[in-house]
Amino acid sequence: MSGGNANVSTEGGGTTFVLIPGAGADPRVYGATIEALRELGHEGIAPPLPLDDADATPSDHADAIVAALGDPPPAPLVVVGQSLGAYSATIAAARLRPSRLILLAPMIPAPGESAGEWWEGTGHGEAIAPLVERLGSPSDWDEAAMAEVFYHDVDEATLAANAEYEGVPSDGLFAEPLPLDAWPDVPTTVLIPRDDRLFPLEFQRRVARERLGLGIEEMAGGHLPFLSRPDELAERLVALA
């Protein structure tokens, strides 16, 4: 699995994708996707993030993303932000002005809104009410519930190989309001896995329309397609870029 600045090389040409996961995960969870991108003639970067800093904000993560790309950054460039990583990806995109921002199974932020406020602001609780009725509040989900919601389409070998990259998001990632007055002037695509149990398809369709005035693109799989469908994810990213 590739990771860190070792993924920055663009000798093979094509597009460079900078890949940001959510929920405190190490970007090296994208290792199989990076390999698939290379097979398609493109490059992927898994930027080191300040995951051990409990106070790190989305802006701090965006600083790390920009630093990992070098000066000048590679071009053409696509920024990909998954789940909670949509916050730092959006801030980074505002600074980098890439050719495209792709939000993958995202928490689509609004200017001035923190990730902690996002849940109520989007009406997420209502969207997963049947799940909560069956499994209880997300804050109380046990290992079995987490497996049902997040890992239902990921094989055990892949989970074991990526266990070291799992993490817990810092409090700072939920506290900082998105420090933008408006959405970045960057072409934006919202890519939604159809079987995402945490952020259901119709919920995402509504939020994308309300917040960005956009429709959505779809792919198969659950919330973590870089684990369950890395080859398909790479193909979709290239097609959308």
Image: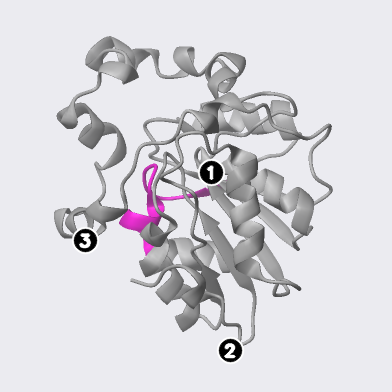
Say which residue label 3 marks: 161
Residue that appears at 49% across and 40% down: 83
Q: Regarding mark 3 in the picture, which secondary structure is present there?
A: helix
Along the line of sight, the residue nearer the viewer: 100 or 57: 57
Residue 231 seen anywhere in this rendered image of the structure = no
Q: Name the disc covering residue 70, or none.
A: none
Quarter occupied by the N terminus: bottom left
Say which element carries label 2: loop
Q: Is residue 219 magenta?
A: yes
Q: Is residue 176 left or right of residue 51?
A: right
Mark 3 or 2, nearer chain start: 2
Cβ atoms under marks 3 and 1 closer than 8 Å: no
In the picture, measured across the screen, residue 212 lies left or right of residue 43, that is right
**Kind of residue at disc 3:** Ala
* Residues shaded magenta: 216-231
Residue that badge 1 annotates: 85
**Which mark sits nearer the N-terminus, 1 or 2?**
2
Tell me the tag on residue 12: 2
Residue 108 coordinates in the image, percent (x, y) = 62, 34
Query: Label 3 neighbourhood size at 10 Å, few (<14), some (14-19), many (20+)?
Result: few
Lateral position of residue 223 relative to residue 59, left or right: left
Between 147 and 179, the one nearer to me in the picture: 179
Q: Is residue 184 visible?
A: yes
